Image (cartoon, rainbow, N blue to C red):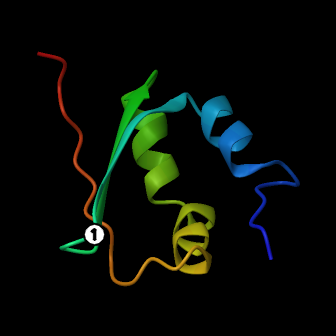
Amino acid sequence: MPVTFGGKEPRLFIEQSGVYLKALFNDISRIEIVCLFKIDDLDKAKAFTNSPNSQKSAELSGIIGIPEILFLDKA
């Protein structure tokens, strides 16, 4: 069953939160995925990553364990 946020597609919901997927890296030897996002508002991004909808989406998409989320400054 697809996950929706307020009836919206996840990508649309995420982009409306000011979070944009910029790169995705997959290391199948370690069963690891790294995603890089551009964000408009750090506080909103932190709120999104801690929201119940974000956690439920991760579980339903097959993520095992707790994702590690880091916020980086632009170099």
Horizontal and vertical percent position of residue 56: 60, 74
Q: Which residue of the protein is positioned furthest toward the top in this rendering? A: 75
Left or right: 48 with respect to 23?
Answer: right
The image quarter containing residue 22 is top left
Q: How many marks?
A: 1
Q: Is residue 75 above or below residue 55?
A: above
Quadrant, the C terminus: top left
Left or right: 14 with respect to 4?
Answer: left
As shown in the figure, which amino acid type bears the numbered disc 1?
Ile
Quadrant, the N terminus: bottom right
Residue sitting at x 88%, y 54% = 7
* Mark 1 closeness class: few <14, some 14–19, many ≥20 residues within 10 Å: few
Q: Which residue of the protein is positioned furthest toward the right in this rendering? A: 7
Q: Is residue 16 above or below residue 48?
A: above
The image quarter containing residue 68 is bottom left
Q: Which residue of the protein is positioned furthest toward the front in this rendering? A: 29
Residue sitting at x 51%, y 33% = 19
The image quarter containing residue 13 is top right
Horizontal and vertical percent position of residue 73: 17, 25
Residue sitting at x 63%, y 64% = 53
Nearer to the camera, 24 or 63: 24
Nearer to the camera, 16 or 21: 21
Label 1 element class: loop
Horizontal and vertical percent position of residue 52: 58, 68
- Circle 1 residue: 28
Horizontal and vertical percent position of residue 62: 52, 80
Q: Is residue 26 above or below residue 1?
A: above
Q: Which residue of the protein is positioned furthest toward the left in this rendering? A: 75
